[in-house]
Image: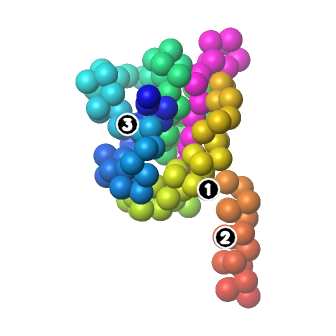
Amino acid sequence: MIRLLADANLSRRFVEACRRLDKELPIIHLADWIAGKHRISKDPVLLEGLREEGIILITFDRRTMAMHAGQLTRSGSGHAGVILFRRSVSQLDYGKQSRLIIEFWKEASGWDWSDRIEYLPGLEASESTSSCQKNRRG
């Protein structure tokens, strides 16, 4: 059963990297989900379709996706969950992206994802990274 969907701003190579690391990870790329039906859908339409199927969206679209998800929550429609990569994660670093998702999903797969938005890496990881960087500059 598919639980995670990588949207159009994530490469299929990310999905392939995830599957190489964990063959059981329930992930699909947007272009492969429902024969690509939602490839050009607007964010709210995509989120509504994913809500109906109970599929969590993975995206780099920090600019608008969190806003649209929040609007759906406030309107009472809700969404099935969104995972956003932080700016510190390169869109070309499929290895880092896949490792973050695999590790995160081990903990988060059992969570109630209704109307939930999570950022990767988590704040703790971001803080430790930035403090290490500060210490190096020191």
The answer to if 43 sits in the magenta stretch is no
The C terminus: image quadrant: bottom right
The numbered mark at residue 121 is 1
The numbered mark at residue 89 is none
Residue sitting nearer the eye, 9 or 31: 31
Nearest to viewer (mark 3 / mark 1): 3
For this view, does 90 lie left or right of residue 125?
left
The answer to if 76 sits in the magenta stretch is yes
Name the residue tied to disc 2: 129
Residue kind at label 2, given as amino acid type: Thr
Q: Earlier in the sequence, mark 2 or mark 3?
A: 3
Percent position of residue 80, x then y: 58, 25
Report how far apart the C-alphas of labels 2 and 3 lie in the structure.
Answer: 30 Å
Report how far apart the C-alphas of labels 1 and 2 lie in the structure.
Answer: 10 Å
Q: Earlier in the sequence, mark 3 or mark 1?
A: 3
Q: Marks 1 and 3: in contact by CB < 8 Å?
A: no
Q: Residue furthest top?
A: 76
Residue depicted at 59% across the width and 48% down the height? 106
Residue depicted at 29% across the width and 32% down the height? 32
Where are the magenta residues, as a range? Answer: 72-85
Q: Is residue 77 visible?
A: yes
Residue depicted at 53% across the width and 31% down the height? 56
Name the residue tied to disc 3: 28
Q: Marks 2 and 1: in contact by CB < 8 Å?
A: yes
Residue kind at label 1, given as amino acid type: Pro
Crowding around mark 2 (Cα neighbors within 10 Å: few <14, some 14 to 19, many 20+) is some
Badge 3 marks a residue whose secondary structure is strand
